[in-house]
Image (spheres, rainbow, N blue to C red):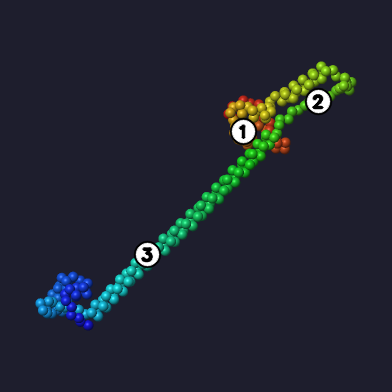
Amino acid sequence: MLTLLSTNEASQKLGISVQGIHYRIKTNKLKSIQKDGKIFVYVDIEEEKSEEVQASVDHAKEIIKAKDEQIGFLKKAIRFMTFQHKTELERMEKTHNKIIDVFKSEVELLQKAYNEMQALYKTQQSTQTISYQPTKNEERSSLSQNQLSDLAKVNTYYNTNENTNTMPIEEFLQFLRDQGKSNTQIKHILYDAIKSGDKRFIYNPDFKKITVYRDNFLDLL
């Protein structure tokens, strides 16, 4: 249905400038009449509405297409982020398990060292006593005070000098303390020496006893 509109009304209706209306009149794309010194043009309202609807439909399709592209991009991003998240969780779990294993190993090693050092501190260097046994022709009760004193000196000499290649563990510990070593450092020194097979330190697990052979021990300081 053709409707007669002024150039200004037609410009607003068609969504173009007034100059565009005059150009369409000049090129016979719009029919016009002159009335009271003003130019009016005929505009097909139904066609215009159809064009507006089609334009709206096209615009809606463009929007839907753009939204579909955005949704597709977001889905890819979500899949990628999910994969990354899963990979990171697996990596963190593996790292966590490795750390736990290391801690367990360290705890076991420290517990073993602690138990061995406790045994070392509880163990005292045993002294071998040479007992004096009277002969058949000699009764112990008949020994004079001087003889008993001489016997005690003999026992003391043998207890101290029976094995001059070894030294009491207490003497070794005191030697290290005199060199400024702490109890923790001494524990590690003994543990490392026994573990490495240092022949200056012989550990008897049956009696939980360490035999220390004399040396200057400069390599341990």
Tell me residue 46's x, y (percent). Answer: 25, 80
63 over 1 or under it: above or below: above
Compared across the picture, whether 11 is left or right of 55 comes to left
Label 2 or label 1, whichever comes before in sequence order: 2
Marks 2/1: CA–CA distance = 37 Å
Compared across the picture, whether 119 is left or right of 80 comes to right
The label on residue 15 is none
Secondary structure state at the residue bearing disc 2: loop
Tell me residue 169's x, y (percent). Answer: 67, 30
Q: Residue at x 19, y 75 (%)?
A: 9
Q: Please tell me in which quadrant of the rendered image residue 35 appears.
A: bottom left
Marks 1/3: CA–CA distance = 69 Å
Frontmost of labels 1 and 3 is 1
Compared across the picture, whether 138 is left or right of 169 comes to right
166 over 18 or under it: above or below: above
| Label 3 sits on residue | 70
The three-letter code of the residue at mark 3 reads Gln
The label on residue 183 is 1
The reply to whether dot 1 and dot 3 touch (C-beta < 8 Å) is no
Tell me residue 18's x, y (percent). Answer: 16, 71
The reply to whether dot 2 and dot 3 touch (C-beta < 8 Å) is no
How many badges with numbers are in the image? 3
The three-letter code of the residue at mark 1 reads Asn
Q: Nearer the viewer, residue 55 or 2?
A: 2
The label on residue 131 is 2
